[in-house]
Image: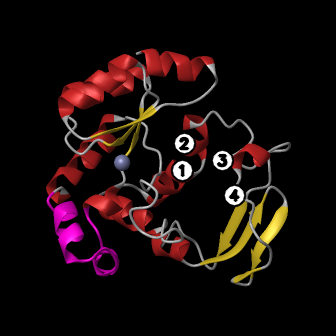
Amino acid sequence: DAIVHAAHQRGLKVAAHAYTAPAIIDAVEAGVDSIEHGYLVDDAGLRLMKKAGVFLVPTLTIARPPSSVIRRLGEQRALGAVRLRDEAAAFERAYHSGVRIAFGTDSGIYPHGRNADEFLVMVEKGMSTQDAIRSATTVAAELLSLDDAGHLRPGDRADLIAVSGDPLDDISRLQDVEFVMKNGHIAKRDGEVTTAIDYRLEQSY
Ligand SMILES: [Zn+2]
């Protein structure tokens, strides 16, 4: 409770990386903003999350790694992850329960730049393509309380990507990003990186 209180006083968010049902309930009761993973969440936990407005960041790719990730991780680590595969069904229950789902990858488990793999698993597990895209845009911005990101409105920061074709028809199109604009600056055009991207969040947010 003290950690959450101190963080919130400083305007920071708190994410709990929690797997088991009791751990998730403890974290929600302590006031965290999001549960990462949540593979073993039960219905009581989902009800509590929904009531408290706690987001689930399901990180399905690391629970159900595609063969490309298994190749990168090595067999032993991948097999450890695969043991959690059935529990990824928690994501389906969470989705249908109305708990808000924000996109996340548990950064570092697989190489940066493969983030869009997560979209494929989300859609494979029953999420609509529109909700999957929202999880990485409007819902993610809402989790982080970014009022000027996650959508395109006058006054918003111009953070955009473009892909060929309509990702609502085929979510895998998000794996091949042709164009990136970050805060109004073009960072990638025609599939080529045009400028070094400043990843330092404190400068842009
Ligand atoms: Zn984690």
Q: Earlier in the sequence, mark 3 or mark 1?
A: 1
* Image quadrant where residue 164 sits: bottom right
Mark 3 lies on residue: 150
**Vertical order, 29 against 180 (above or below):** above
Mark 1 residue's CB less than 8 Å from ligand 1: no
Q: Nearer the viewer, residue 109 or 155?
A: 109
SS of the residue under disc 1: helix
Give the foreground label among 4 and 3.
Answer: 4
The amino acid type, in three-letter code, at marker 4 is Tyr
Amino acid identity at mark 2: Val
Give, as a three-letter code, the residue at label 1: Arg
Q: What residue is shown with label 4?
A: 199
Magenta region, residue range: 64-83
As helix, strand or loop, the secondary structure at mark 3 comes to loop
Rendering colour mode: secondary structure
62 to the left or right of 169? left
Residue 169: x, y in percent?
49, 71
31 horizontally vs 12: left or right:
left
Between discs 2 and 1, the one toward the N terminus: 1
